[in-house]
Image (cartoon, rainbow, N blue to C red):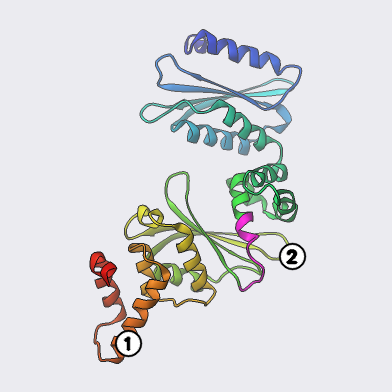
């Protein structure tokens, strides 16, 4: 009853009318109401009772908190014979905002329609021509553990990366920020996992510090495999995303495939936003000087180039 005075009469009317409209036709629906003082956002979510699960409640709460730029303070649930009604209270003080209700309603409907249709819809937003074929090929290959912690949008991005591979000798790489703004890197391979003793030294030579790794084995005949790494860079997360990430992704993939050198000169690609071809020239220059009697080691030379970016760019 305290909610009756927590937000405007117009918002209260919308909540009441929406709840009434679901009595005869249960379906996923949400209504957002900002508190009168503007400190809280009340999110009312209705689901068909048979489709309510704890995992979905948590996923919906995370979706709402992310969209509003706040944190879930509490939640409550009420169930009748047909509908489960969930109310989330989100703290939107500070940088909180009123999210786009229509967009969230669409995401909620996609979340509830089932895994494979949701993945196909997410693929259609990027690759309409191949969305159905890719969904049929890959959507049901993701294990349940992956589906619990990842959205259909993330699965669509992984599928697009996996679809670029033709043989077990090829590698695909994707860099991105997670919901907390941390840097993550995914490695993709057909034919099973990549030995960590092969992958981690490559990432370290690019200047990354590997914090954790989450493996995902796909259940299909191609033995598709995804390695997800939480990484840190010496220059911070910004250093990883300042340049064109596709250049860095292709450089890492080339080293993993054995088509490029695996040494500390690769740090220049991350720290100085250098083109891989320029790193190759510096590597050749260093080896020429070593043959001429240079006594400095590779690590010393790379550190000197990193600490003098203006001089390095001039060279």
Find residue 29 and report its horizontal and vertical position in percent: 64, 25
Q: Secondary structure at mark 1?
A: helix
Q: Nearer the viewer, residue 96 or 275?
A: 275
162 inside magenta stretch: yes
How many C-alpha atoms fall within 10 Å of the one at disc 1: few (<14), some, or many (≥20)?
few
266 vs 56: above or below: below
Q: Which residue corresponds to the image point at 54% horizontal and 35% vertical from the top-left?
A: 63
**How much space separates mark 2 and mark 1, taking CA atoms?**
47 Å
Q: Which residue is mark 1?
A: 288
Left or right: where 299 falls relative to 47 = left
265 vs 124: above or below: below
How many C-alpha atoms fall within 10 Å of the one at disc 2: few (<14), some, or many (≥20)?
few
Camera-side mark, 2 or 1:
1
Q: Name the chief secondary structure element in magenta.
A: loop
Start-end of magenta stretch: 159-169
Q: Nearer the viewer, residue 162 or 49?
A: 162
Which quadrant would the C terminus be assigned to in this image?
A: bottom left
Q: Are marks 2 and 1 in contact (CB under 8 Å)?
A: no
Find residue 159 and report its horizontal and vertical position in percent: 64, 55
Left or right: where 256 falls relative to 142 = left
Left or right: where 101 falls relative to 53 = left
Q: Which residue corresponds to the image point at 36% horizontal and 59% vertical from the top-left?
A: 233
Q: Which residue corresponds to the image point at 27% horizontal and 77% vertical from the top-left?
A: 301
Left or right: where 135 falls relative to 266 = right
Q: Nearer the viewer, residue 226 or 175?
A: 175
143 inside magenta stretch: no
Q: Which residue is mark 2?
A: 221
Q: Which residue corresponds to the image point at 59% horizontal and 27% vertical from the top-left?
A: 102
Q: Residue furthest bottom?
A: 292
Q: Secondary structure at mark 2?
A: loop
């Amino acid at each position: 009853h305290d909610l009756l005075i927590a937000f405007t009469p117009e918002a209260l009317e919308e909540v009441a009318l929406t709840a009434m409209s679901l009595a005869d036709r249960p379906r996923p629906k949400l209504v957002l109401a900002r508190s009168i003082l503007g400190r809280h956002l009340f999110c009312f979510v209705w689901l068909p009772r048979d489709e309510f699960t704890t995992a979905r409640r948590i996923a919906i709460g995370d979706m709402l908190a992310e969209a509003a730029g706040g944190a879930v303070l509490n939640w409550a649930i009420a169930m009748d014979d047909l509908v489960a009604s969930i109310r989330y209270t989100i703290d939107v003080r500070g940088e909180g905002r009123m999210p786009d209700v229509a967009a969230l309603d669409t995401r909620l409907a996609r979340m509830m329609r089932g895994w494979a249709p949701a993945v196909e819809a997410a693929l259609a937003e990027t690759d309409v021509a191949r969305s159905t074929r890719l969904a049929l090929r890959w959507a049901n290959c993701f294990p349940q553990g992956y589906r619990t912690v990842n959205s259909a949008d993330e699965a669509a991005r992984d599928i697009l990366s996996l679809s670029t591979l033709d043989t077990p000798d090829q590698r695909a790489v994707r860099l991105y920020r997670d919901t907390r703004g941390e840097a993550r890197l995914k490695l993709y391979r057909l034919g099973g996992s990549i030995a960590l003793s092969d992958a981690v030294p490559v990432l370290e030579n690019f200047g990354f510090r590997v914090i954790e790794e989450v493996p995902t084995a796909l259940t299909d005949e191609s033995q598709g495999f995804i390695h997800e790494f939480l990484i840190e860079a010496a220059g911070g997360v910004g250093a990883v995303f300042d340049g064109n990430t596709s250049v860095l992704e292709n450089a890492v993939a080339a080293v993993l495939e054995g088509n490029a050198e695996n040494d500390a000169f690769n740090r220049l690609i991350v720290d100085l936003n250098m083109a891989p071809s320029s790193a190759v020239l510096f590597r050749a220059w260093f080896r020429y000087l070593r043959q001429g009697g240079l006594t400095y080691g590779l690590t010393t030379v790379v550190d000197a180039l990193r600490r003098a970016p203006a001089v390095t760019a001039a060279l």
